C-alpha cells in the first residue's frame, strides 16, 4: 500500500508540485512571522547589553526609562554612584521623510556611553553617535531635531527599540538643553552594580524589568502576528487537505479494489498519511529556503531562530496529518462493491 502511495505521487507529480510550492510559501511566511516576533525581543536584549547597565533607577511613578518622561534630579548622582541619562523621543526631517529616533543623553566616558563601531566616540557638545539602521545618516553628516543641529561623529550597530527605531546618543548637557532648558535633570540613573542606597522618590529596575516595559507597547502587535501565523497554518492544512481529498475522489475505484482484495482501511490511510508527510516535509525544506531568501527584503529585521527551523518539520507534519484526516474520512466510506461495478 505504501508503494502504491508513492507511485501515485509519481503519477500525479505536477499536482503535488503545485501544492508543495503553495504550502511552502505559506510555511515560509509563518517562519518570517516567527522571525519578526523574535526580532522584537532580541533587539531589546542587544541594546540593553550595549548600554551595559546592571541596574536602572527611575522616578517612582515612571513605568520605565524608555516609555516615561519623569525627570529626576542629577545633583545626588555622584553620591549614590549613578550615571545620569536622559531619554527622549524625537523626529527629524530626512528629505521628504520624517524619521523617528530614540535619543539618549549621556555623559561622555561614563556608564552608558556608546562605543562606536566606526568613527569616533562621543566627546562633546553638538555631536551625535547614530546606529547604522538610521539609513542616510553617515559620519560627517548633520542631523537637526529639537531646533538644534548635531554632527554625526560615529556609528553603532544593532541598537534599536520598538521594532526598529534607532537609538542615537548625544551628550547629557545637549539633551537637557533640548528638553528641560538646561536644568540638572535626567530621566534615569545607570548603575554597574546593585545600588545600596537610593532616595525614596526613585525605584530600581533590572534589565529584565526594562525589557518588559519596552515590550509592553508591542503586545498587541505580537498577538496579531501570532494570530496571523495561526491562520497561515490553517491555510496550509486546507491546501494539503484539498489536494489529498481530490486525489481520494479520483481513486475511489482503486480504494474499492484494495478493500475488495482484503486491504484494510488503516493500510489505505497509512498510504494517504505517507503522501501527506512527503508533501509536508518537501514543502518545509522549500519553505526554509524561501524564508531565508525573503527575510532580508522586509523593512523590519527578521531574525528567524534556529528553533524555528527545527520545529518547522514537526509543525508541517502535524498540519499534513491533520489535513490527511479529511481524505481518510472519504476513503473509509468507500464500498468494496464499487470494484465490481460497470
Image (tube, rainbow, N blue to C red):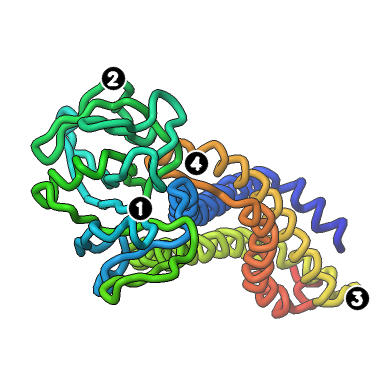
Q: Nearer the viewer, residue 173 or 300?
A: 173
Q: Residues within 10 Å of mark 2 (few under 14, many from 20)?
A: few
Sooner in the amino-acid sequence: mark 2 or mark 4: 2
Mark 4 vs mark 3, CA separation in Å: 51 Å
Question: Which of pointers 3 and 1 indicates the residue nearer the eye?
Answer: 1
Does residue 231 show up?
A: no
Quarter of the image with the N terminus is bottom right
Q: Check the picture and name the quadrant holding the C terminus.
A: bottom right
Labelled disc at residue 140: 2
Secondary structure under tag 1 reads strand
**Mark with earlier residue (3, 2):** 2
User: SS at mark 4?
Assistant: helix
What residue lies at 71% left-to-right and 67% top-to-bottom? 252
Mark 3 or mark 1: whose residue is earlier in sequence: 1
Q: Please state the horizontal and vertical placement of residue 175, each as a whole percent of the image.
A: 20, 45
Residue situated furthest right in the rendering: 262
Residue 75's place in the image compared with 24, above or below, is: below
Residue 244 location, quadrant = bottom right
Gap in angstroms between the C-alphas marked 3 and 2: 81 Å
CA distance separating discs 3 and 1: 81 Å
Q: Earlier in the sequence, mark 1 or mark 4?
A: 1
Q: In the rendered image, which residue does mark 3 sit on?
A: 262
Residue appearing at x 35%, y 64% in the figure: 57
Q: Nearer the viewer, residue 10 or 196?
A: 196
Say which residue label 4 marks. Answer: 295
- Quarter of the figure with residue 335: bottom right
Q: CA distance from mark 1 to mark 2?
A: 28 Å
Q: Is residue 191 above or below residue 126?
A: below
Percent across and percent down for residue 254 are: 78, 64
Amino acid at each position: 500500500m505504501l508503494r502504491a502511495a508513492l507511485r501515485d505521487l509519481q503519477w500525479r507529480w505536477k499536482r503535488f508540485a503545485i501544492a508543495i510550492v503553495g504550502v511552502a510559501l505559506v510555511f515560509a511566511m509563518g517562519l518570517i512571522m516567527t522571525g519578526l516576533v523574535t526580532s522584537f525581543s532580541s533587539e531589546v536584549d542587544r541594546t540593553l547589553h550595549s548600554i551595559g547597565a546592571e541596574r536602572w533607577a527611575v522616578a517612582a511613578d515612571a513605568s520605565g526609562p524608555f516609555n516615561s518622561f519623569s525627570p529626576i534630579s542629577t545633583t545626588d548622582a555622584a553620591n549614590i554612584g549613578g550615571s545620569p541619562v536622559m531619554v527622549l523621543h524625537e523626529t527629524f526631517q530626512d528629505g521628504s521623510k520624517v524619521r523617528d529616533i530614540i535619543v539618549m543623553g549621556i555623559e561622555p566616558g561614563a556608564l552608558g556611553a556608546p562605543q562606536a563601531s566606526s568613527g569616533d566616540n562621543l566627546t562633546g557638545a553638538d555631536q551625535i553617535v547614530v546606529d547604522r539602521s538610521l539609513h542616510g545618516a553617515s559620519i560627517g553628516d548633520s542631523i537637526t531635531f529639537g531646533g538644534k543641529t548635531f554632527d554625526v561623529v560615529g556609528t553603532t550597530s544593532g541598537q534599536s527599540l520598538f521594532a526598529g527605531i534607532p537609538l542615537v546618543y548625544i551628550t547629557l548637557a545637549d539633551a537637557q538643553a533640548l528638553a528641560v532648558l538646561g536644568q540638572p535633570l535626567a530621566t534615569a540613573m545607570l548603575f554597574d552594580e546593585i545600588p545600596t542606597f537610593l532616595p525614596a522618590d526613585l525605584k530600581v529596575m533590572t534589565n529584565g524589568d526594562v525589557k518588559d516595559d519596552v515590550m509592553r507597547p508591542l503586545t498587541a502587535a505580537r498577538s496579531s502576528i501570532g494570530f496571523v501565523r495561526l491562520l497561515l497554518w490553517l491555510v496550509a492544512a486546507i491546501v494539503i487537505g484539498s489536494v489529498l481529498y481530490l486525489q481520494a475522489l479520483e481513486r475511489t475505484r482503486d480504494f474499492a479494489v484494495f478493500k475488495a482484495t482484503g486491504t484494510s482501511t488503516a493500510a489505505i490511510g497509512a498510504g494517504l498519511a505517507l503522501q501527506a508527510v512527503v508533501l509536508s516535509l518537501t514543502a518545509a525544506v522549500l519553505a526554509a529556503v524561501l524564508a531565508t531568501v525573503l527575510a532580508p527584503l522586509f523593512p523590519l529585521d527578521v531574525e528567524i531562530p534556529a528553533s524555528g527551523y527545527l520545529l518547522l518539520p514537526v509543525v508541517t507534519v502535524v498540519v499534513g496529518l491533520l489535513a490527511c484526516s479529511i481524505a481518510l474520512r472519504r476513503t473509509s466510506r468507500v464500498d468494496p462493491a464499487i470494484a465490481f461495478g460497470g
